[in-house]
Amino acid sequence: MKMLNKIEQLGLVVIGRNEGDLLRQCLLSAIAIVPHIVYVDSGSTDNSVSMARSLGIEIVELDLSQPFTAGRARNEGFFHLLKKYPQLELVQFVDGDCEIVDGWLETAKKTLEAQSDIAIACGRRRERYPDRSIYNRLCDLEWDTPIGITKACGGDFMVRVAAFQQVQGFNPTLIAGEEPELCIRLRQQNWQILRIDAEMTLHDARMSNIRQWWQRALRGGYAYAEGSWLYGKTAERHWVKESRSIWFWGLILPLAILALLLPTHNFSLLLLGLYVLVIYRVYQSLDRQLTAKDAWSYAIHCVLSKLPQTQGQIRFHWGRLQGKRSNLIEYKALVMTKSNP
């Protein structure tokens, strides 16, 4: 077995709920190199907690009386580590359904040490089984984002402790889109976010049906709505353009087509051609290194996802007007429910 030197200034926060064997893989991928690891559990009903404890991992079990969010879980893990190990300079966050790729932790650490203005270093998250379903493949394509200075990261990243403390961590009330929101506040403090040309994590989406795809897109629409509501009036107009696009393609145009059916003697159906046109434009804009199948699949996904995203937008604004916050929007739970009636 390859012997690795542990990075004493590094801590790891793993969050999860009912991840089972995926959580074991996640923890084992880091245990040899990260000396300080905490697993934050959000009410698992499987053996996640006992399994993590058997590996010698520190456990934080979230209070069931408060709403679960990924931001809340990451915050509690981070501040638990910092309280016990105040010497920490860097913390890696990772979701419990991901496995850290060999070499990533060292690469990210060196990058942050070499560039003092970088708050977050992230790399390439890949889907472990992209060919098992079209939905898994779409996830893999979605995560293939440009390298270099960027505006936001996903759920897996390494952060400078001082920067995270400066902005007081995640907004624990957000049920989605908490990472871009964190990055906004970091950039407001003159920190930068860097995506490295390196493999970071392997993810297992376990998406096998259209209901999961719909639920995941719905969550995205909710995040766009809340993000634009919170920061849409700032200079960068956070997610305003995306939200307007969702409303137009997911609601305004469909309603216009239906409303004009009788007055135009069904000729309004010709407006459906606009969807074909925009799908083609997205296809043309994609990286030419993609296969034609992947490019067409992703283009169709980008346009059709406006429909569930509209539902997510409505869900956010309806809750806002009622003064209520939504519960977590989970897509994996749909498989668990189906297999465990």
Image: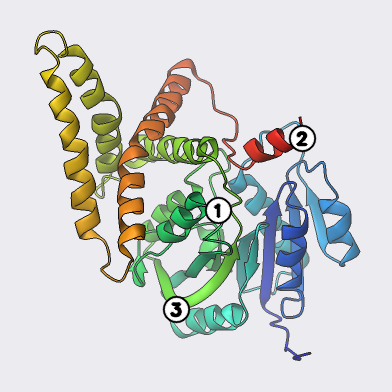
Q: Residue furthest top?
A: 262
- Quadrant for the C terminus in the image: top right
Q: At numbered mark 1, what does the secondary structure look like: helix, strand or loop? A: loop
The residue at the point 76 percent across, 91 percent down is 3
Residue 295 in the image: x percent, y percent? 31, 58
Q: Which is more toward the observer, 315 or 282?
A: 282
What separation in Å lies between label 2 and label 3 (alpha carbons)?
49 Å
Q: Quadrant of residue 229?
A: top left
- Compare marks 2 and 1 and give the one earlier in the sequence: 1
Q: CA distance from mark 2 to mark 1?
A: 39 Å
Residue 160 in view here: no
- Marks 1 and 3 in Cβ contact (< 8 Å): no
Between 235 and 211, the residue placed more toward the observer is 211
Residue located at (25% from left, 68% from top): 288
How is colour applied across the structure in the image? rainbow
- Dot 2 lies on which element? loop
> Dot 1: few (<14), some (14–19), or many (≥20) neighbours within 10 Å?
some
Q: Amino acid at mark 3?
A: Ser
Identify the residue position indicated by label 1 in the image: 168
In front: mark 2 or mark 3? 2
Label 2 sits on residue: 340
What kind of residue is marked 1? Gln
Label 3 belongs to which residue? Answer: 116
Front in this rendered view, residue 182 or 242: 242
Whichever of callouts 1 and 3 sits on the residue coming sooner in the sequence is 3
For mark 2, does the 10 Å Cα neighbourhood hold few (<14), some (14 to 19), or many (20 or more) residues?
A: few
